[in-house]
Structure formats: C-alpha cells, structure tokens
Amino acid sequence: MAATYDPNNIFARILRGEIPCKKVFENEHALAFNDINPQAPTHILVIPKGPYVDMDDFTAKASDAEVAGLFKAVGEVARQAGVVADGYRTLSNCGRDAHQEVPHLHIHIFAGRDLGGMIGRPKA
Ligand code: 5GP
C-alpha cells in the first residue's frame, strides 16, 4: 500500500520556507540544497516541489514535466558543483529496506572523494 504524504515532514517545511536550507539550485519543479550531515565533500539533496513520498509515489503520480524537472535538476546541480569530471553518485532511498528517513522524495548527489563500492553492509 502506498504511503500517505506527511505535509509536515522536514523537506516540506524547507519547501515552505519554515526551516532554512543552503540552497544550491532551483527550477520550476525541483529544489536542491546541501545535506545537513554530509557523507562526502559534496553531498546535495535534490527534491521535487510536489508532495511525493518516495520514488515509487513520484513515478506513479508525477506529471512528465515534474519528472523531467527533477532529473534535469540533478544533472544541472552536478555540472554547477563541478563534479562531473571526477564523477559522482546519485542515490534515492525508497522505503523500509533502504532506510529512507525523510518521507519526501530526495535524490542524494555524492562527490568529492572515492565513493567506494555501491552498496553498504547491513546495519548491525
Ligand atoms: P534518507 O536516509 O532519507 O535517504 O536521507 C535523508 C537525508 O536528509 C540525510 O542525509 C540527512 O542528513 C538529511 N537531512 C535530514 N534533516 C535535514 C535538514 O533539516 N536539512 C538538511 N539540509 N538535510 C537534512
């Protein structure tokens, strides 16, 4: 069963301007800002402006313009951050097994160091 969107999740509050963020990019459909607890020298979150819980919710319900706006933002953010030449990783946690913490779709962009293997070990 699809999760219900919580309009008071932290990223919804950032979108409403109730909580500050270090914005790095914005277009009609997406906002990008620095992660508060960076896991790499560059760690940026790209989120849709619409109310979508996760990648499943977004790809089922968002318009083509919203999907294009989010993914174009990811590429634009990486180019603006200057991380394309050395490489970067995008990641989006969806649901329980992926340990998604914030229930508003977000795409992580990691860069600035060797990012190692693709998937980590299970939490102890
Ligand atoms: P998840 O585990 O859901 O994929 O990742 C959630 C991310 O949101 C984490 O990397 C966490 O550091 C980040 N985060 C949580 N709260 C805030 C906040 O208030 N501001 C910002 N900029 N990032 C946050």
Image: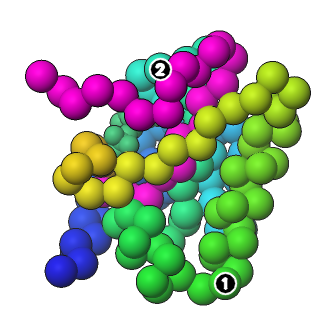
Three-letter amino acid code at the position of disc 1: Asp
Magenta residues (range): 103-124
The spot of residue 10 in percent (x, y) is: 33, 48
Quadrant position of the C terminus in the picture: top left
| Residue closer to the observer: 24 or 95 | 95
Residue positioned 40% across, 72% down in the render = 56
Do tag 1 and tag 2 residues touch (Cβ < 8 Å)?
no
Q: Quadrant of residue 109?
A: top right
Residue 10 seen from this side: no
Residue positioned 25% across, 65% down in the render = 6
Residue positioned 59% across, 43% down in the render = 90
Three-letter amino acid code at the position of disc 2: Gln
Q: Callout 2 environment at 10 Å: few (<14), some (14 to 19), or many (20+)?
A: few
Quarter of the displayed picture in which ligand 1 can be seen = top left
Magenta residues, dominant SS class: loop
Q: Secondary structure at mark 1?
A: helix
| Residue closer to the observer: 78 or 117 | 117
Quadrant position of the N terminus in the picture: bottom left
The spot of residue 5 in percent (x, y) is: 28, 71
Q: Callout 1 environment at 10 Å: few (<14), some (14 to 19), or many (20+)?
A: few
Magenta stretch holds residue 98:
no
Q: CA–CA distance between discs 1 and 2?
A: 31 Å
Tell me the colour scheme of the image.
rainbow
| Residue closer to the observer: 98 or 80 | 98
Left or right, residue 36 beside residue 71: left
Q: Quadrant of residue 7?
A: bottom left
The spot of residue 46 in percent (x, y) is: 58, 49
* Residue assigned mark 1: 64
* Residue assigned mark 2: 39
Q: Is ligand 1 less than 8 Å from the beta carbon at label 2?
A: yes
First in residue order: circle 1 vs circle 2: 2
